[in-house]
Image: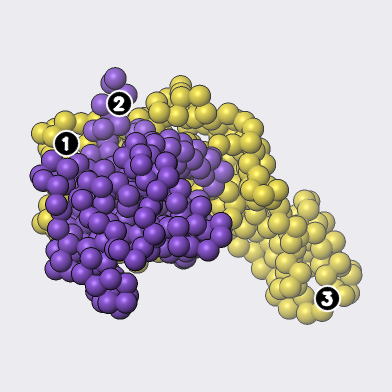
Chain colours: A purple, B yellow
Amino acid sequence: MTAVLRVARESSQLARRNLLRLVRTPTSLVSSLLEPVMFALLIGFVFGNSLGGGIYREYIVAGLLAQTVVFTTSFTTIGLSRDLEEGAVDRFRALPISRVSILLARTCSDMIVCVASVCVTTLSGLALGWRAHTGVLHTAAGFLLLLLFAFAMSWVGAFIGVIAPTVQVALSLGFIWMFPAAYISSGYVAARSLPGPLAHIAEWSPITALVNALRQQFGNPVPRQFPVPRGWPVEHAVPYLLLWSAVLLTVFVSWATYAYRNKSKSR
Amino acid sequence: MVVVEELHKKFRGTPALRGVSLDIGTGEIMALLGPNGAGKTTVVRVLTTLLRPDSGRARVDGWDVRRDPAQVRRSTGVAGQYSSVDDMLTGFENLYLVARLRGMKRAPARRTAGDLLDRFRLAEVAGRPAAGYSGGMRRRLDLAAALVGEPSLVVLDEPTTGLDPEARLDTWEEVGRLAARGTTILLTTQYLEEADRLADRITVIDRGRVVAAGTSDRLKAAAGTSRLFVVVAGDHEMAAAVRAARLAGGAEPTVDTRGRRVEVAAGDGQEALARVLTALRAEGVQALEIGLGRATLDDVFLGLTARTRGVTR
């Protein structure tokens, strides 16, 4: 228990340091805050009118929210790899603190960025005509699920940040997986409409799990010309999302910590 | 206080440390002196638990760096050539963060940060981000950060590399003050002057090996009180010059092939000069320069490191 408290105390100090840095370089936030608006407008209005108009624009908000939390992980990746490259991590490692604290501080402080991005995405969604039709409780549950999944995803970002040998590599590695992850899903189209094996990947993808759960919690309908989503992942959207979050957390917390420990031994 | 025994470390097959041993007594200042790439920073990284050695042991305050890294970290403060200062944080925030991470509560952490800022003459700029600090101010802040929590060993990794002369003097004074308080210090440097001036004892390393150790006086004595040198015009005269120098000095001379310069310790100074003149005449060699000079720590250092580099002989 004391160990847990210690990690919590150390992480909160380090997270505070990350936030101070963030506050002093507000420009680093610009892309995280503008991207959601841009994608909402692009997808809502470039594809929107051919794909169902208003109902489509309401449909894609779950996808936009999912894309936002996926894209925000690059913040974690870059922040961590920069700290590693600039020697900040070495300095912390020479102090008597737990090694997990540095990773945990990063994933926690980046949740602030994530929340801000989610707010912008939600506002953009409201502007597109999106509404939650299910009442306060379900809406709140939807956002909580979103943040839980976002936290799990940020450990994916942390893992990439640790294994990337330089910030340059982290930049490209941190971005390259995001587009397929966000788009091979039911975020913007029906998963079942994708060709061949992609349809199966999309149907079972964690992003689809998130999107399905969000649509359920917010009560957002599927456009009429889309095939009706069915199957286990749709019928058990929330438990399936919780399962994915747990799996991602377990796998990437241990991988990131392991890679981090090894890095400290060999360099 | 610090005991290092037979450290070995390879990076991708390339040996960085090939059996480094040293010990530092409590309150002592030890300089680890060597050229770039000698393995100084590797020793520091092992001692500060950032790097695991392939073999060998290192203990700080009785704690083994491999078995009790947490204890070692508690006992050690590090300041380095890669300044550990966080640019975007203010001087105060930097020190406060370290104090909190060292387990201090809010009030004592604030007090410690304030005291150190006063002590290192940074109180005036305490509220400004460190990015705006001068080189000397950053180094002082770095040093202050290493002292948070009063560690029993302070490791300074090339504390003056990249500093202008004024800031260097400034840093030397701080180290002197620190030593006067009885803190044990391990200092790495590539400057002889720095080692000579600050350290009680010097360990010279080159290519991952200790090539000499002792007080600076002893190292100077080992190099001979005087140095005799001969410079010749042609490569074909080098062999003769080496023979003459060996005869005159009674020891194996160091040879700089490119400069066509032969040098040897000459205990009896002037007499050796006379002998080398006779010997050169007998060899029929016309020297460009012949001279006698006092040994400096530079001679010791260059002699030692050149020998292990295989430039000589």
Camera-nearest residue between B254 and A113 = A113
Instruction: Tell me where residue B153 appears, x and y as whole percent.
Output: 38, 34
Q: Nearer the viewer, mark 1 or mark 3?
A: 1
Does B50 sit above or below residue A220? Answer: above
Assign a secondary structure to mark 1: helix
| Disc 1 to disc 3, C-alpha distance | 66 Å
Q: CA distance from mark 3 to mark 2?
A: 71 Å
Disc 1 to disc 2: CB gap under 8 Å: no
The answer to whether the residue labelled 1 contacts the one labelled 3, judged by CB atoms less than 8 Å apart, is no
In the displayed structure, does residue B69 sit left or right of residue B296? left
Q: Is residue A60 above or below residue A267?
A: below
The amino acid type of the residue labelled 2 equals Val
- Residue of label 1: B109
Most foreground residue, B43 or A198 = A198
Label 3 secondary element: helix
Task: Please determine if labels 3 and 2 lie on a single subunit.
Answer: no
Q: Identify the residue position indicated by label 3 in the image.
A: B235
> Would you name the residue on which mark 2 appears?
A4
Counting every numbered tag in the picture gives 3
- Tag 3 subunit: B
The chain that hosts pointer 2 is: A
Where residue B179 appears, x then y in whole percent?
Answer: 33, 39
| Depth check, front residue: A207 or B68 | A207
Spot the residue most to the top. A1
Tell us which disc is closer to us: 3 or 2: 2
Q: Position of residue B150 (x, y in %)?
A: 27, 33
